Structure formats: C-alpha cells, structure tokens
Amino acid sequence: MHALDEYIIKLPWSNDPQERAVEQQVVDHIREAGCHLMGVYPDSDADVEFVYSVGLWANYGFPEAICLGLPARTGGQLINSLRDCLKAGERPDLGQPLTDFLANDYAIQLEPVQDLSMAYEDYVCWAGWFYQEPVPIVRLCWPDRDGRFPWEPECNEVNRLAQNRLS
C-alpha cells in the first residue's frame, strides 16, 4: 500500500456533507497534484499571510513546507517549485541556500520547524487533520531585498518578524 493511502484510511471524515466535500477536495488534490496548498490570510495587522502544504510527507517522504510573510500566491508558487523538485526525484538540502527558486539569484532556505506542537496548533491545522500525528515541517525562508535571511543580524525587521514566528 502506498503511504498516501495509509493516511487516507485513518482520516476522521466529517459527518457534515459540506465539510466532507471540502475534506474530499483536499484529499483529491493531494492525490492528483502531490500536495494541497492552504493559504491563510490575516485577520488583523498583527497577523501575517502564509501558505503551507499538505501531502509532501505522504507522497515524497519530505517535510511539509510553510512560507510565512509572503502573499499566499507567491509562497504557493515556491512550495509548488519544491514539490516539482521532489516529483523529479531531487531532495533539497535543509539549512542550505537554494538558488533555483527565486529570480535575481536570490536564494531560499529550508529550515526545520522545531516547535511542532505550536506549528500544528496555530498554523498547519489541515496537516494535523490529514496526518493525525505531527510530521516534520520546514519553513521556506526567503531573503530581504539585500539577500539577507531572517536570522542574519542586518535582515530587514519586517522580514525577520514575519518569518521567525516558527523558528
């Protein structure tokens, strides 16, 4: 049995027909596209927009990805690029700059999320529903306009605050 099917068998499907239809769309997208992207939009100025994947772990054995602070559409394109690499059999290194994702020779970097309980509680709820247990997650980190990542001292404060929520 494929790993994806092992997760699907254990799903706690809703009894509500509308919720069940949404859950089925998520599962169908994971099966057909390799992952489902969930965009989350801020309720207030204190929140940041973000997007995360559900399905990378089940389909490719690679941690789920979350991109904080970019428009969900842009972050989703980056996660889809990651998915395409995984589909092609490539395994990007964690903690190393990756230069094939952004224009202008900017790099991204995949950093493991350390506090999985906070991530699942506050950020990646659909991944929690799908897996029914914590699986690894990586932050898809992006540089400021000067090419600095959020952990670098000179990084733009807006970038640092948006992305360091799950360090």
Image (cartoon, helix red, strand yellow):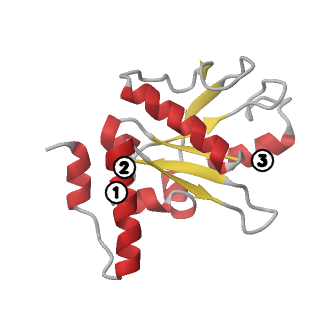
Q: CA distance from mark 3 to mark 1?
A: 33 Å
Q: Residue at x 74, y 30 (%)?
A: 143
Residue 142 at what x, y percent from top left?
69, 33
Residue identified by numbered label 1: 27
Residue identified by numbered label 3: 161
Q: Number of callouts in the render? A: 3
In the image: residue 49, left or right of residue 109: right
Mark 2: which amino acid? Ile
Mark 3: which amino acid? Leu
Do residues under tags 1 and 2 come within 8 Å of each other at their CB atoms? yes
> Label 2: how many residues lie within 10 Å, few (<14), some (14-19) or many (20+)?
many
Q: Residue at x 30, y 81 (%)?
A: 15
Secondary element type, mark 2:
helix
Which quadrant would the N terminus be assigned to in this image? top left
Q: CA distance from mark 1 to mark 2?
A: 5 Å
Mark 1: which amino acid? Val
**Mark 3 against mark 2, which lies toward the viewer?**
2
Do residues under tags 3 and 2 come within 8 Å of each other at their CB atoms? no
Q: Decide which of tag 3 and tag 1 comes sooner along the chain.
A: 1
The answer to whether residue 111 is above or below residue 131 is above
Secondary element type, mark 1:
helix
Which quadrant would the C terminus be assigned to in this image? top right
Give the residue at the far left of this rendering: 1
Q: CA distance from mark 3 to mark 2?
A: 31 Å
Q: Which mark is residue 30?
A: 2
In the image: residue 22, left or right of residue 156: left
Residue 82 at what x, y percent from top left?
50, 31
